[in-house]
Amino acid sequence: MAVQKNRGLGRGLEELFSAVEINTSDVPNESDDQKSEDKSNKNSILYLDINEIKPNNNQPRKRFDDEKIDELAASIETYGVIQPIVLRKSDIGYEIVAGERRWRAARKANLKKIPCILKELTEEENMVISIIENMQREDLNPIEEAEALQQMIEKFGLSQEQVSRSVGKSRPYITNALRLLKLPFEVRDYVQEGKLTNGHARAIAGIADETMQVAVADKAVEEGLSVREVENLAKTIGEPKVKKQNQKRIKSPDVLKVEEELKVVLGTKVNLKHSGNKGKIEIEYYNREDLERLIDFLRNIK
């Protein structure tokens, strides 16, 4: 069975399928002797009772798209399960290491048995492989990924550098991913629901004030802002307000007087930016009619 390697991950899933042979004698058979023999063959694809299999407690993926599960179930009904799931022995039956989505779809397709590969794994290996499998398939949303990486740190006492090596991602990638867990729950929910991308979340994480983080997230979702627009908005929020205050203070009484006179003449707010012997005049308008009025006024000046 050929498995395409993903060089972006240090411990790719190709290791799971090394030295695997398809044993045609493992096709569903109710014989107890055959069943026992199949289970003892660690280098074969086994066909195991789907009811003896349970989900992985360390599964980083928490949300499954029901529509996509239905689509996969329909495919399985037609073509069967093309890629086996990976299991390890549990106290009762077997626990899924990789392939929970296929297992769920196979249950919907009413399969009695499913092709599996049995592996002997430690708790740490189980978690790392489960994370890698989902990351390679891009099945995790950014928050699920961050929670999984954090769990590796907390449960096994790994450093960020060790996590980086385990999942084949750079140290800055791990650091940026973990930063998302500091976002308010409202923002994290937007990311998990697919309303905000990883890029949006990282830009919002750069805002110091939590209330502003939520406000920017709300605005991004409601107005469909791009990542670049959110980055610019976050940058604007982060700029010190002292600069703008100082700009107002440097206006001389003469400049303020001219602004007031123009305001009376034009009937709208006027901002005079003066520096040395040159500057510019900003005239505000509030709708199309207001703009047309100002244009007519300026045209008639003699």
Image (cartoon, helix red, strand yellow):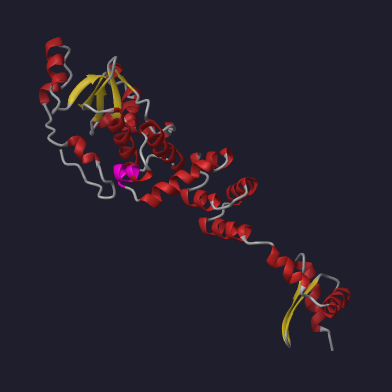
Name the spot of residue 96 as percent of width and height, x first.
30, 26
| Residue 249 appears left or right of 202 | right
Magenta extent = 162-168
Q: Is residue 126 left or right of residue 120?
A: right
63 in relation to 224, above or below? above
Give the residue at x 30% y 32%: 124
Residue 25 colored magenta? no
For the question of whether residue 74 can be seen, the reply is: no
Residue 164 counted in the magenta span: yes
Q: In the drawing, does residue 244 fall left or right of residue 203?
A: right
Q: Nearer the viewer, residue 130 or 3?
A: 130
Is residue 237 something that shows in the picture? yes
Which residue is painted at 48% across and 52% down in the image? 199
Residue 171 x, y percent position in the rendering? 37, 50
- Identify which residue, 169 or 83, lies in the foreground: 169
- Nearest to the observer: residue 206 or residue 154: 154
From the top left corner, tell me how far across and down residue 9 is, in percent. Answer: 28, 46
- 111 sits to left or right of 185: left
Q: Quadrant of residue 238?
A: bottom right
Task: Point out the image quarter for the C terminus.
Answer: bottom right
Q: Which residue is painted at 28% across and 50% down in the image?
A: 8
Q: Is residue 153 placed above or below 122 in the rendered structure?
A: below
Q: Taking 110 as reference, is 78 above or below it?
A: below
